[in-house]
Amino acid sequence: MMIKKSVTLIFILFYFCGFSQKVIDKDIESEILETTRNLKIYLPKGYEKDSLKNYPLSIVFNSEFLFDAYVGNSVLFAAKDKAPKQIVVGITMDKTQKKDTYFDIESGNLTEDNIAFYEFVRDEVIFYVESNYRTSPFITLVGTGTSAKIISHFLKEPKPFINSYICINPTFSDYVGNQFQSFNLPKFKKEDNTFYLYINNATSFSLKKQARIGELQKGLATIEMKNFNIINDTIQTSSSVSAISEAIPRALTKVFEIYSAISKEEFDKNVKDLSPNDAIAYLENKYIEIQFLFGSDLGIRERDIYAVEKIVLEKENGDKLREFGKMIQKIYPTSPLGDYYIGKYYETGKKYSKALKYYKISYGKMDPADPNADAFYENILRLGGR
């Protein structure tokens, strides 16, 4: 286990060396806080080159110690194709009076300073970043301790606009259950969007804190909404610091799960028992949602095409091959596979001239150096003599 953690840290440090020069320090005047606050803004590699691409936005509280860890993980996840590249903004907290997030622990209520900081994030920080940088609609808030408590209050917004709420090692009051009830979480069901709430417990916490978070997680576990994903996590560790280092990648894995290629778990849970039509629709909707949420025009990963291919070929005598091909053409027009499957559909129906037409189009989209090019050309040779 120690070796695994060390390797992860080495990867993160390696990627950190690569992103350090891309962090912009920006001081903004806040009318709400009546002072100047520093923002650290990380722009992902390639941001300057592609003027049309948008990126999901992550806002990290406690930037003095959480920003680097989150950016390092975000770069690593993007490099492994497990998450989109992100714009990450770190907010420097009030270091002297700790008034930004230190709430009334007795009542659990936010102080006037807490409310001002909340409004600063909502009305000034997000507005500034969205006005000056190319962000997609997907917004994540990340915080730890009392900052996680402030983040949870964004759940009460009448019109939800935050997509993921990552509450690491959260500090709550004894009244946290009542406060979450007041947030009216069922309202999220009405939204045509996707949401994530991550809350971790840890064996390093005091027994009282473990019990408080455990009761909240127990209550949250009873909530069932298709578009509101609750991630109740428990980290086995003897240190709250190591809990933070583990929580970030665990949260990212779940929050950006839809972005990743179809895993065996996802296939077994959501795909394998579908009809061809439903499997095609599932794949199409997955990539449409990736495009909408994250601003990432991926086309369709070939491994995901092949994951659904077996269902389309084996069920209903392959009658849905044409629909499968058209879906690929629509979302991934440069791929030869869309035309290939349409050609295969026509060949199965013994309409050889139409099949040959689509096989030729398919081959024409391929790089001659592609090791699969010869196999695609054999389709043309096979039907060309008919």
Image (cartoon, helix red, strand yellow):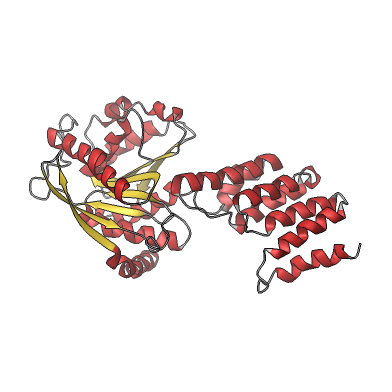
Q: Where the N terminus falls, by quadrant? A: bottom left
Q: Quadrant of residue 382?
A: bottom right
Using the image, determine if residue 375 lies above or below residue 111. Answer: below
Q: Residue furthest bottom?
A: 369
Judge from the rendering whether residue 54 lies leftward or rightward of residue 106; answer left or right.
right
Query: From where the camera sits, is residue 237 visible?
Result: no
State the residue at coordinates (13%, 41%).
33
State the residue at coordinates (69%, 52%).
309
Q: Quadrant of residue 51?
A: bottom left
Judge from the rendering whether residue 253 lies leftward or rightward of residue 350; answer left or right.
left
Q: Residue furthest right?
A: 386
Q: Where the C terminus falls, by quadrant? A: bottom right
Q: Residue furthest front?
A: 51
Numbered circles on residues, count: 0
Residues 196 and 375: in front is 375
Residues 4 and 116: in front is 116
Residues 25 and 1: in front is 25
Q: Position of residue 171 (x, y in %)?
A: 23, 41
Q: Position of residue 299 (x, y in %)?
A: 57, 54
Q: Position of residue 176 (x, y in %)?
A: 26, 31
Q: Position of residue 190 (x, y in %)?
A: 45, 27
Query: From where the camera sits, is residue 227 visible?
Result: yes
Residues 286 and 96: in front is 286
